[in-house]
Amino acid sequence: MSMENKCVDMTHYNDYDKLKELMSKSGYKFDFERIDKAYNFALNAHKDQRRVSGLPYILHPTSVACILVGLGMDTDSIIAALLHDVVEDTEYTLEDVTKLFGADIALLIDGLTKLSKIKYSNREEQQAENLRKMLIAMSNDIRVIIIKLADRLHNMRTIECMQEQKRRDKALENMEVYAPIAHRLGITAVKEEMEDLSLRYLDPVGYAEIEEELNNTAHDREEFIASLKEEILERSKDTVPNMSIKGRVKSIHSIYRKTFMKGKTMDEIYDIFAVRVIVDSVIDCYNVLGIIHDIYKPIPNRFKDYISTPKPNMYQSLHTTVINHRGIPFEVQIRTWDMHHTAEYGIAAHWKYKAGVGGKNGDSLDEHLSWVRKMLDIQKEAVDATDIVSTIKTDLNPNEVFVFTPKGDVINLPAGSTVIDLAYTIHSAVGNSMIGAKVDRRIVPIDYQLKTGEIVEILTQKDAQGPKRDWLKIVKTSEARSKIRSWFKKERREENITEGQAEFERELRKYGINIPEDELEEFLSKVNLKIQVNNLQDFYAAIGYGGIHLWKIMPRIRELYQKMYGKQAAEAVPVKPVEQNVRKKVGSGVIVEGMDDVLIKFSRCCNPVPGDEIIGFITRGYGVSIHKCGCTNVPEDISKAEEPKRWVNAHWQQSVKEVFQTSLEIIGMDRTGFLADVSNQLSALHIMIRSLNCRELPDGMAIINVTIDVVDTGHLKSIIARLSGISGITSISRK
Ligand code: MN
């Protein structure tokens, strides 16, 4: 964790003297007399109470006050922090507080007390209600939420003594609600510490791994940053008068997000190390940028100008990622002091400016408040409380979406995730058998991007054909991508085994070799294969993918066969290729480049028809199989395919007069006569129907799969156009 961002560490500032010291050192004006009075009142009110840890209760409000001083908050906030648990946890009432400290303070305390009071049985509902209360409190006085954040933060720092379940609940709520609010209000210091502390309880192992890695590299990193500092200072000393350079390390939570959630290794994260340059003016920022880009090589597309276009939470800085002379990439953040205060303290920085320290960002409070007001407006229109939770969550954390399963489970995905990502998040079996999805009860395309609050149902089918290769381009999460890849690898293995076995058996027949099946494995173990195979399946797969060449091992097999079985292997007799499953088409209408009179089969996975762009694959002994370009079984990049030479160019002969089979998937409302309308329309067009089936989908929809004869793509298009006219149809796609 970046020390710079860490809020005041309570192990050093754990009593009232330390609070006073902090206030004096802060450079801001405080009303010490009123603060004294508040402290003494709270000390007395809590005198018999202890924290779960056994320590005196007063340490908690005092610590919260310390955090607020660190954020630059004012006297009223400090007083409210000291008194924040008095009304809720002691015999004193709000009237007592009003009498002693005035209506303003009482209002803050009331806001804070209300925030923590009501408990609901259902977690979503509870969160919704908490958020609503927070928003109302914020719109009355935004300091309430800043004090609340400090309260949560201190509780999180001292949560060690709580029960495991309670720690996890609190940690989760921080991640889902409080850290995003801190982020939205721009209070980075609180956000980052809160996320790191919460992560420690949510995934202790992951947290420890990253922490250890950071500790192991701490020394190198310090040296690295020191050398960068020196270089940058040396080069800019004449141009930029006042400059502060600090090295910083990404927070553990943000490294975690990138490593565990985006599947990167720590080496692949460019901005684990960052250098932060703080200067006096905006001109200096751009000057420094020029100098940095001159010393180091910038990585393309990594420059971001948040000065001209601030983030929604008012954050401003220039960001760039560069590579030093040793090839180590690092991020540089360049900003002015004003921007720095806003970046660290966000909306809390407002009180500093009010107190006459710092610059001109007077509008920032209004802008932050306008967000709160917008949320409240949405809340007024919202029909039920959970609506507002989803709205707020989207707005708070644009990098994530939260969707619901039909059972009401919440699933959290990176923004831009599709229904496929969701399917694979649930289970790889769900993804592999997925045939479609419904969002809020309506069928959506497979590349549909999810939005927070949507209810998503994944439609699966037992005998689904598995993922399509296109999905790799559609999915957002690395989890889904790797699961799809592994499916293909495994599927290819099965193909390889089938092919390998057929080839091997053909070869054995050719030489008249007959080894009993149950002795085959042992027999092969005696053949020196030069490649690790654990069983017969491995052996066939290896033949299938070309790891074992039969022509190389056959002589040894023949020799061994003779030795073990005492039989002479026959000299090779020509064996005709097996022609099962081949839709033989003499004059199939396809020309394969460089091959005459070749056996053509049309692959079943994509059923190409004239007009489609096609490509051929030279199979082992089965002729050339023709696929549609873009079919899932055609590699995206042929040159990187396992056997690139087997892929050959193919195209249609002119004036093909044959018919081709193709399959359509038609989805529509499941009304009486739906299927009849489809088949009537097809027969009216004189289309030969090869197969037709209809299946009910949940929620009143139905899906029809039909295989028909068509002449070419133009013909197919006109058929689809006619079918689209049938009432209730929502989609027609080619399978
Ligand atoms: Mn508290």
Image (spheres, rainbow, N blue to C red):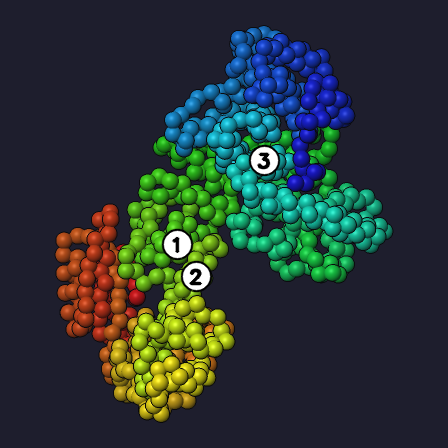
Q: Which residue is mark 3?
A: 197
Marks 1 and 2 sit apart, C-alpha to C-alpha, by 10 Å
In the image, what residue occupies the spot 38% across and 89% down? 595
Mark closest to the chain's N terminus, 1 or 2: 1
Residues at marks 3 and 1, CA–CA distance in whole angstroms: 31 Å
Looking at the rendering, which quadrant does residue 179 occupy?
Answer: top right
Amino acid carrying label 3: it is Leu
Which residue: 36% across, 57% down? 432
- Asked if residue 502 is positioned above or below residue 120 in the image, the reply reads below
Q: Which residue is mark 2?
A: 486
Q: Which residue in the protein does label 1 denote?
A: 428
Which x, y percent locates residue 160? 57, 29
- 169 on left or right of 673: right
625 on left or right of 719: right
Residue 526 placement (x, y as % from top left): 44, 76
**Tag 2: Cα neighbours inside 10 Å, few (<14), some, or many (≥20)?**
few
Q: Quadrant of residue 505?
A: bottom left
The reply to whether residue 307 is visible in this rendering is no
Assign a secondary structure to mark 3.
helix
Q: Amino acid at mark 2?
A: Ser
How far across and how far down the image is residue 283, in percent?
Answer: 75, 48
Q: Earlier in the sequence, mark 3 or mark 2?
A: 3
Q: CA distance from mark 3 to mark 2?
A: 35 Å
Q: Helix, strand or loop at disc 2?
A: helix
* Crowding at mark 1 (Cα within 10 Å: few <14, some 14-19, many 20+): some
Picture coordinates of residue 137, whole percent (x, y): 51, 24
Q: Earlier in the sequence, mark 3 or mark 1?
A: 3
Residue at disc 2, CB closer than 8 Å to ligand 1:
no
The three-letter code of the residue at mark 1 reads: Ser
